[in-house]
Amino acid sequence: MPFPSPTLAARGLLLSLMLMLTACQPAPTQLRIQGKTMGTFYVVTVNDAFPGGEAALQREVDALLVRMNQEISTYDPGSIISRFNQGPAGEPMVIPAGMAKIVQQGIDAGQLTGGKLDVTVGPLVNLWGFGPDKRPVKRPTAEQIAKARDRVGIDKLSLTTQDGKFLLGKAIPDLYLDLSTLGEGAAADELAALLEGKGVSNYLIEVAGAVRSEGHNAKGNPWRVAIVEPSDRPGAIEDVVIPNGMALSTAGSYRNYYELDGQRYSHIIDPASGAPVTHRLVSASVITPTALEADALDTALMVMGPEPALAFAREHKLAVYLIVKTEQGFEARFSPQFAPYLQQQQP
């Protein structure tokens, strides 16, 4: 069974693809397939011939995504990650190379961001009702939060190699690893590798808010993506981004929330406090060479909040675009490195 990612509802609305297709019929070689995976959607558009045509493309894409779910779906009790979570401490498990790459990215991003991204934060996510567990009927107590936090920390997770094999271990038996916040980016990258391995050099891939593109669309123009604010009002922010072969990932917070006793609780959990964030950052988009890296960083930025996120982007020279809710409405802020990817608005 596919697993829903905590940021997907927001991502699907914050990131809409603007496919620059011909007004009438698409080019003969253009293929477009879509489906569901990881609790969300995917769309793959190919502007080249694919061996075997559309049926083969659909079949190979779905097979790849099924394989990934069998590795990292926490909603599948038989998946590799579920067996790891249910297993004992002190006995490392051999995991596939693809899964190891995702885990390593989670560890690296967690260290880079000072723990703002934590792939072991699941107990806190579940405690606040944003995981498989039901939403609480009342706010978790300080004692409950502290108990859940004792099970959280990437320092309790280890990834080593031995004889060419990847070994995943944990220091405590009830550590809960959840890679859903990285799954969409990882899937976008693997789909890109699949297409390129088949000789495809013009494509656009979207797995929820994670996007990979290369080459040109059917009109011979670079692929374009629109980032829109969570508003239906006239004049809302809608900046067009041209990734130019880079990966783009967007995380958001404004859709996935609930209200309890008059208080609004976001699904974005700060591992440090053990509670949902309360700042006004509603969306974070990141451009990096791989969707996996971008997918890791956008979540961390959402935990940081607007000012720390922009400062972090500038310090590390990251291409970052933020949407912040202010008293006057939504406001877009971006780092200098993001500016070159924004399409100049026509007068």
Image (spheres, rainbow, N blue to C red):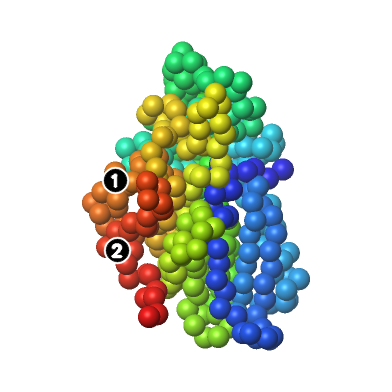
Disc 2, SS:
loop
Q: Is residue 127 above or below residue 14?
A: above
Would residue 53 be found to the left or right of residue 132 on screen? right
Name the foreground residue: 309 vs 42. 309
Name the foreground residue: 325 vs 214. 325
Residue receiving disc 2: 337
In this view, the residue farthest toward the right is 55
Residue 106 position in % (x across, y down): 44, 43
Residue receiving disc 1: 307
In this view, the residue farthest toward the top is 143
Q: Is residue 231 visible?
A: yes
Name the foreground residue: 68 vs 344. 344
The C terminus, quarter of image: bottom left
| Residue visible at 55% across and 71% down in the picture | 18
In this view, the residue farthest toward the left is 315
Determine the CA span between mark 1 and mark 2: 16 Å
The N terminus, quarter of image: top right
| Mark 2 residue type | Gln
| Mark 1 residue type | Glu
Q: Is residue 248 above or below residue 263?
A: below
On residue 66, the disc is none
- Mark 1 and mark 2 residues within 8 Å of each other at the beta carbon: no
Q: Is residue 309 above or below residue 223?
A: above
| Residue visible at 48% across and 50% down in the picture | 251
| Residue visible at 37% across and 57% down in the picture | 332
Would residue 129 be found to the left or right of residue 284 on screen? right
| Residue visible at 49% across and 15% down in the picture | 141
Instruction: State which tag comes first along the sequence, 1 or 2.
Output: 1
Disc 1, SS:
helix
Residue 284 position in % (x across, y down): 42, 52
Q: Mark 1 against mark 2, which lies toward the viewer?
A: 1
Q: Quadrant of residue 158?
A: top left
